[in-house]
Amino acid sequence: MSALRPNWQALAALVATLYSLTALPFTAGMSAPYSLAVAAILIAGACLSMLRLPSGVEALVLMVASFAAAALLIAGLAEATGTATAGYFASLTAAWLLAWRLVTVLSGDGRSKGQGFGLVSITVPVLFGIWVLILWECIVRGAGIPFVLLPPPSAIGVRIGNSLPILAADFRQTVLKAVLFGYVVGSLSGFLVAILADRFRFFANGLLPIGNMVSALPMIGIAPIMVIWFGFDWQSKAAVVVVMTFFPMLVNTLAGLAASGDMERDLMRTYGASHWQVLMKLRLQAAMPFIFNALKINSTLALIGAIVAEFFGTPVVGMGFRISTEVGRMNLDMVWAEIALAAVVGSLFYGALALLERTVTFWHPSYRR
Amino acid sequence: MPETVISAQNLDLTFETNDGPVHALKDITLDIAEGEFISLIGPSGCGKTTLLRVIADLEQPTGGTMSVNGMTPEQARLARAYGYVFQQAALLPWRTIEKNVGLPLEVMGLDAATRSERVRSNLELVNLAGFEKKFPWQLSGGMQQRASIARALAVEPAMLLMDEPFGALDEIVRDHLNEQLLKLWAKTKKTVVFVTHSIPEAVFLSTRIVVMSPRPGRIHEIIDCDLGPDRPLDIRETPEFLKIAHQVREGLKAGHSYDE
Ligand SMILES: Nc1ncnc2c1ncn2[C@@H]1O[C@H](COP(=O)(O)OP(=O)(O)OP(=O)(O)O)[C@@H](O)[C@H]1O
Ligand SMILES: [Mg+2]
């Protein structure tokens, strides 16, 4: 067996680094030796990683090389925005390829599935997220993309740090009031109406066509009407969220209630079980995967609904209000700060639901252990 | 003379399907006395399951009358007159084995102490002690089927309707459960209606064997099978046993050739 274990990411990184040497220095702010140091780190990392090292050591080498190179590349942009050469982007590509290799090694080289599940399942998405930010930062600043088009993440980060009170107030207004209230009321009433519609079939037959119609209505049309009905404050936004979340829950719950098997229902019949007993012990349980589906869909809809509804008149606070006014003032970093907040809130919301789903529907074939 | 508990008179059942009517049961007349062990045997599709489901009020006949314990099947069902074992185990995946067996008892509104006592004794009966906390999908198909039998027995019904309960089990387990069922039947004097495809099983267990034939499903022949209450497994090698088995086989063959 040879001492070498070539892989395409490291080989490609090597090629990219060698190419970058034709365009020294990388930026106006990087001296030639500084640029060479970056290249040296990348070449060393690529070569070392192709030796037959234990995968832990290989991961460490790749981690150090890719992040050291990235840090130097970001530092090299100071006072040199827009001056990056082809060499700069080539070495950035090389660093990114090494990070790709790192993720591959961490996930067991595509082989041993499930091993080290807990740690890897967190590390991989985190690495992925960090690299999205690194690439964003380097490309935007290296190529000198105008701030209005896309601010670099560092500027967004600074803006977030400086605007915490504003962001907190917007979060309270939009998420804690409009989203939460609308989500709970919309989902709960959708659920309860589904239970009724299931009991009294004619009810369902009348409701579902209306439901389809309402979910096809553009939110742009509903939001101003809700403002007229419920006023400028969060109540009108919550009303929009209620309208948006009600029908997904209704439709999914009805589908879920029909999901239990014929044999299970016959079984309950042989016990002389009442409608409510069948509902509680069999059909609602079987409907849980559907209900969680609706809860997850609604978590996204609620956030979008509340933010967009604020475009149509609101007191001077709220995430949607902030986005629409700051866009007008060309304060794109503030807009992005709100977007980042929305992304974090949305992911946490969704993640919490997914976690809850796992515990409640542990029996479902996709979660069984 | 023991009382008649299940009585079918000129029963007819036609399923209306998209490709025309299916005549599943035709002119079924059958009286089953209390404490009898009746086996229904016949080729696939001859209406064994359908007949059992009519008794259980899971299917409505399109003609004739059916009475169970002198009541309509619906009244009997609501009075929880029978325990039904389906062709598949039909355990609820979110409940442990213990909770699955306790399900009918919860529906009946029994208190927790009675429930757990009945669950325990019936799981022991089908050799599933120690698996109380497992979930159905963690058990083999045979174990699941045994759990579903325990579930039907836990109701302590006077009547058991069993649809090929041992069809999915291996020969040894099947023999064992056959013996257990026979003992249980001898001890409790339950009325049992038992669907099977196995001639030896039918002869070993039954007091009467109903041979059915298909298209339309009807009773071809009823064979008495009185081997006495005490039946060790090796009774299956005796000439009396083999004679009845032969008779059943001939009946099945005749029923088959009928529509060819
Ligand atoms: N719900 C239904 N709708 C339409 N046709 C049905 C229905 N249930 C049963 N049948 C038909 O009735 C006939 C009898 O079916 P049944 O299930 O009683 O047969 P079986 O004797 O139990 O067969 P097997 O031994 O395969 O279980 C078959 O032709 C079947 O296709
Ligand atoms: Mg059948």
Image (cartoon, coloured by chain):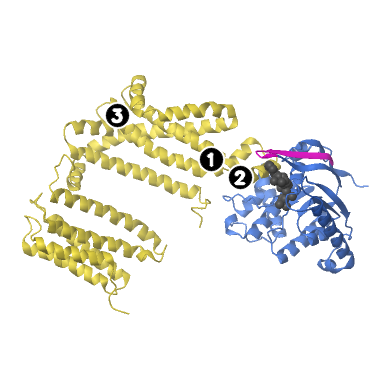
Q: Residue furthest front?
A: B260
Assess disc 1: are there few (<14), some (14-19) or many (≥20) residues with their C-alpha within 10 Å of its C-alpha.
many
User: Mark 1 and mark 2, same subunit?
Assistant: yes
Q: Nearer the viewer, mark 3 or mark 2?
A: 2
Vertical order, A163 against A212 (above or below): below
Q: Which mark is residue A310?
A: 3
> A159 left or right of A54?
left
Q: Colour of chain A?
A: yellow
Q: Residue A256: give its label.
A: 1
How packed is label 2: few (under 14 Cα within 10 Å), some, or many (20 or more)?
A: few
Secondary structure beneath label 1: helix
Q: CA distance from mark 1 to mark 3?
A: 33 Å
Q: CA distance from mark 3 to mark 2?
A: 44 Å
Image spot of residue B237 (x, y percent): 84, 69
> Which residue in the protein does label 2 denote?
A261
- Separation of disc 1 and disc 2 at Cα? 11 Å
Residue type, label 2? Gly
Name the image quarter holding the N terminus of chain A.
Answer: bottom left
Specify the label residue B216 is tagged with: none
Q: Nearer the viewer, residue A6 or A46?
A: A6
Taking the spot 29% from the left edge, 75% from the top edge, the residue there is A52
